[in-house]
Image (spheres, grey):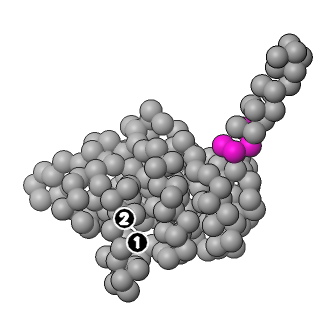
Amino acid sequence: MERHFRIPVSEEKVRSLRVGDVVYLSGVLVTGRDQVHRRALQYLREGKTLPMDLRDGALYHCGPIMIEKGGEWRVYGFGPTTSARMEPVEAEFIERTGVRFIIGKGGMFERTTEAMGRLGAAYLAHPGGVSVLATRSVKRVKDVHWLDLGIPEAMWVLEVEDFGPTIVAIDSHGSNLYIDVMRKAEERKNSILRSLSI
């Protein structure tokens, strides 16, 4: 099923999604890689507020290519980065920020899946290798925070229109496309080995 959402998005709408649904997003999209996760969690653990409220929002695992021209930032690359690196901290990040969508490539695993089910969030897989498609969805750069971390690691705040297509790869009902595929591949491998008496 194809769905179009405007950010912020409610828990109810996120819980209506199932693995395999195609999702397009419009509204405010925030980027965050390793360093954003690390700093955001440090802030929140210390009782500080983040420069951007992520509640009911969308966080994109992306290190964009940005160039400043005439006092304005422009996006020249907006493809996803590998999400698995954030697996150790993503569950806590979702819980502390209230973010509804995590977007990236390559999938996430058990801890994130459990947190998404408990808290009403979903993981959207953006196809890798099509940065130009994602770049075209950006209408403007609204803000940037923590630029001291470097351009790829900073927290970029962008306005997007029909960002996608993304595919729901982890839903809020415990389904995880990546884990399911790995489990089926392992079962198939074992079946083949048994048939060969190996």
Disc on res. 5: none
Rendered location of residue 148, percent (x, y): 18, 62
Segment colored magenta: 177-181
Question: What residue did someone put label 1 on?
Answer: 41
At x 52%, y 39%, the residue is 127
Q: Is residue 161 left or right of residue 78?
A: right
Q: Secondary structure at mark 2?
A: helix
Q: Is residue 46 left or right of residue 25?
A: left
Mark 2 and mark 1 residues within 8 Å of each other at the beta carbon: yes
At x 40%, y 79%, the residue is 44
Mark 2, Cα crowd under 10 Å, few <14 / some 14-19 / many 20+, is some
Q: Is residue 196 left or right of residue 37?
A: right
Residue furthest to the left in view is: 70
Question: What residue did someone put label 2 on?
Answer: 38
Rendered location of residue 7, percent (x, y): 51, 67
The answer to whether any part of residue 83 appears in the image is: yes
